[in-house]
């Protein structure tokens, strides 16, 4: 995987982002969404022959149950209940108007046999497998072109048994790109809540080409040295709400994406209108919030508050590079980070633009960091503003942000309704993210 240039790479021992007078972002786009939707029809997975002993393979039972429930999709929808037990399975697909509900002592376990995870075509915005050319393994739980889908429980568990996949990755013996735990494509009105996700082979939760997505009250766990076990990765998706989650993993806690290089440009599906709140995470190999590196379709209108990241490599990281987006240079603009307090911070910020492509309107306001480095800021090829920043920000940001409308407070029309992305087909964009942090 290519090395990327960081616009903002804050190296933190402990990061937290707290509420202020700024109106809460939680629920801006997902007010009407809930995991508690009444389904008039319900079955239990044991009715289809499933055995919860952790040994019996139940793929056929899951597929048959969901095939049966499809007959109720136009009759108010249905629920598939998974009771207490250890339910070993390969990949299975969901349907519209379905609730998959897990008992608090239920564990859905991914099969350790790679043949139980079918091989499927690459995503059109990626053009190939993320790790290897060609196809990729299908996610444990998947679906396409769905509406009104709920994956929930009383904090039941979905365990991908990722260790065997991580071994294949480290040994360079993978034949195809590793699978995610959950991937929904081209879907709308998706709720994922009140579950624990463990040991994903690759990314954990991956809504791609989706809209109206709510992820809340989930716990995501993987060893801190596990490769590429991103927590929640909205990808070319709009109107996404992520709140009240705990993530401890080996890569980014949350990574916002929008396709890869020329494929992402030609597919032209940006990620936009994303709200993030009340997240706690720990990651040795990534960031609390990352943008990219696959961001060729553009990212805009992201707001975050209440982020707490412990013992991690970066607080915020924007990952891009020349050529990210085919032959285009990325456009990074209108980024506001404010209300930050931090201690035990290694480096306050690395803000590096690209030759011939300065990053613009970078705004820092009310930032106070206790930094270990004698050179807290590393800035080049950027333009922007700052106000009340300790240690004093780099010279390129020393204009007062109070005197410009290019810094956002979360309530302006530009921050709420969005700025139309420019040159979507030829440029990667990151526009109008607003983040409020307190870093400890």
Image (cartoon, rainbow, N blue to C red):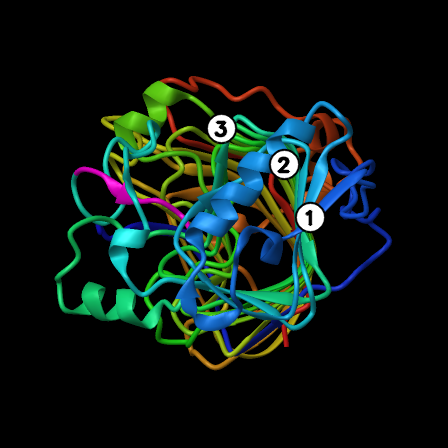
| 3 or 2: tag closer to the N-terminus | 2
**Boundaries of the magenta span:** 134-140
Q: Is residue 91 left or right of residue 194?
A: left
Q: Is residue 385 left or right of residue 263?
A: right
Label 1: few (<14), some or many (≥20) within 10 Å? some
Foreground mark, 3 or 2? 2
- Residue 62 against residue 358 in the figure, above or below: below
Q: Which residue is mark 3?
A: 270
Residue 157 located within the stretch drawn in magenta: no
Q: Is residue 94 left or right of residue 244?
A: left
What kind of element bears circle 3?
Answer: loop
- Report the number of numbered marks: 3
Q: Which residue is mark 1?
A: 43
Callouts 2 and 1 close, C-beta under 8 Å: yes
Q: Nearer the viewer, residue 24 or 108?
A: 108
Q: Which residue is mark 2?
A: 69
Q: Position of residue 31 (x, y in %)?
A: 82, 38
| Magenta part, dominant SS | loop
- Report the residue that reaches farthest toward the right: 21
What kind of element bears circle 2?
Answer: helix
- Residue 147 against residue 403 in the figure, above or below: above
Q: Is residue 191 visible?
A: no
Label 3: few (<14), some or many (≥20) within 10 Å? many
Number of the label disc, if any, that sits on residue 317: none
| 3 or 1: tag closer to the N-terminus | 1
What kind of element bears circle 1?
Answer: strand
Q: Quadrant of residue 157?
A: bottom right
């Amino acid at each position: 995987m290519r090395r990327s240039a960081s616009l903002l790479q804050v190296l933190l021992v402990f990061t937290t982002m707290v509420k202020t007078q700024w109106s809460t972002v939680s629920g801006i786009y997902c007010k009407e969404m809930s995991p508690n939707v009444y389904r008039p029809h319900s079955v239990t997975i044991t009715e289809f022959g499933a055995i919860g002993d952790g040994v019996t393979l139940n793929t056929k039972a899951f597929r048959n149950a969901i095939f049966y429930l499809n007959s109720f999709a136009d009759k108010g929808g249905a629920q598939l209940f998974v009771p207490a037990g250890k339910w070993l399975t390969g990949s299975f697909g969901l349907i519209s108007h379905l609730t998959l509900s897990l008992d608090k002592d239920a564990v859905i376990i991914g099969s350790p046999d790679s043949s139980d995870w079918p091989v499927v075509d690459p995503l059109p915005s990626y053009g190939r497998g993320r790790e290897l050319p060609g196809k990729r393994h299908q996610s444990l739980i998947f679906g396409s072109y769905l509406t009104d889908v709920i994956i929930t429980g009383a904090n039941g568990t979905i365990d991908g048994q990722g260790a065997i996949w991580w071994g294949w990755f480290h040994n360079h013996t993978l034949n195809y790109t590793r699978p995610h735990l959950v991937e929904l494509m081209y879907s709308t009105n998706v709720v994922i809540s009140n579950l624990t996700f463990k040991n994903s082979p690759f990314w954990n939760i991956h809504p791609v080409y989706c809209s109206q997505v709510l992820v809340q009250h989930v716990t995501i766990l993987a060893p801190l040295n596990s490769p590429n076990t991103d927590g929640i990765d909205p990808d070319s998706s709009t109107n996404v709400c992520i709140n009240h989650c705990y993530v401890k993993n080996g890569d980014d806690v949350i990574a916002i994406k929008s396709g890869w290089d020329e494929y992402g440009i030609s597919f032209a599906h940006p990620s936009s209108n994303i709200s993030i709140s009340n997240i706690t995470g720990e990651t040795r190999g990534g960031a609390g919030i990352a943008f990219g590196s696959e961001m060729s379709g553009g990212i805009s209108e992201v707001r975050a508050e209440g982020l707490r990241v412990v013992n991690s490599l970066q607080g915020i990281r924007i990952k891009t590079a020349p050529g990210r987006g085919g032959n285009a240079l990325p456009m990074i603009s209108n980024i506001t980070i404010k209300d930050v307090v931090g201690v035990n911070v290694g480096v306050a910020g690395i803000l590096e633009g690209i030759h011939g492509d300065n990053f613009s309107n970078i705004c820092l306001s009310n930032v106070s960091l206790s930094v270990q480095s004698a050179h807290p800021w590393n800035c080049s090829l950027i333009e922007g503003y700052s106000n009340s920043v300790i240690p004093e920000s780099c010279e390129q940001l020393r204009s007062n942000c109070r005197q410009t409308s290019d810094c956002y407070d979360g309530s302006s029309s530009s921050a709420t309704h969005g700025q139309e992305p420019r040159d979507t087909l030829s440029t990667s964009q990151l526009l109008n993210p607003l983040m409020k942090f307190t870093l400890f």
